[in-house]
Image: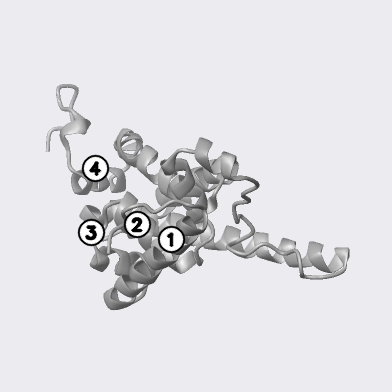
Amino acid sequence: MNTGAGGSLDALTDEQLVVLIQQGNINAFNNLSQRWETSLYRFIRRMMGNSEDARDVCQEAWSKAYQNIGSLRDGSKFRAWIHYIALNLCRDRFRSLKSKAIHSSYEEGGLETMPEGGGKAAQWATTRHVEQTSLKTLLDEVLTELPNEQRTAIVLREYQGFTSEEIAEITGVPAATVRSRIFYGFKALRRLLNERGISPTLPA
């Protein structure tokens, strides 16, 4: 493996870069993080529903990846592994937000106004607002109204390009369960979009 001045880290596979990182090559980690940073941020952004939380989680995910990359046995699975780390951080953040929301709700005298979907459910005031919102933005916002498990499966497959088997490894459930979550997630998305007067063509 050529890693000298004339060698280009950009030409190396994820697996080769992981080997170098585990040997102490910090430049290899920088290259790997640059390769997947944008994709990972977009995944976290769609999971969290806002940019501020997404930036924090993304930064923490890369920090944890650097600290624990020595435990990664198969470097070819780095992309799935970093998404696994990010997903667990998102879950931790959801639990924290839910706990704060419940505490705040009790202080205010009830649970009636608690939002669903991790406290990030989109609010729609008028039909005009829907008309002025692009379908991409609309989908991102409606995604936040799905149960976390369905949103995770859909985002990992449709936006990140993972197979059902890869998603099963990331989420820790059988591939059949992943496919079921995707099916019912899209069913819910169609309903939510139809309620807003939009009938998009979504995967079956």
Q: Three-letter amino acid code at disc 3?
A: Asp
Which quadrant is home to the N terminus? top left
How many numbered discs?
4
Cα gap from disc 1 to disc 4, whole angstroms: 38 Å
Could you say which disc has been placed on residue 17 in the image?
4
Between discs 1 and 3, the one toward the N terminus: 3
Could you say which disc has been placed on residue 189 in the image?
1
Crowd class of label 4 (few under 14; some 14 to 19; many from 20; radius 10 Å): many
SS at badge 1:
helix
Residue 185 placement: quadrant: bottom left
Q: Which residue is mark 2?
A: 156
Residue 99's place in the image compared with 197, above or below, is below
Between discs 4 and 2, the one toward the N terminus: 4
Q: Three-letter amino acid code at disc 1?
A: Leu
Cα gap from disc 3 to disc 4, whole angstroms: 11 Å
Crowd class of label 3 (few under 14; some 14 to 19; many from 20; radius 10 Å): few
Residue drawn 33% across the image and 69% down it:
183
In front: mark 1 or mark 4? 1
Relative placement, left or right, of 142 versus 16 is right
Cα gap from disc 3 to disc 2, whole angstroms: 20 Å
Residue drawn 46% across the image and 58% down it:
194
Q: Looking at the picture, how far across and down is residue 145, in whole percent?
A: 54, 60
Q: Looking at the picture, how far across and down is residue 92, in whole percent?
A: 57, 62
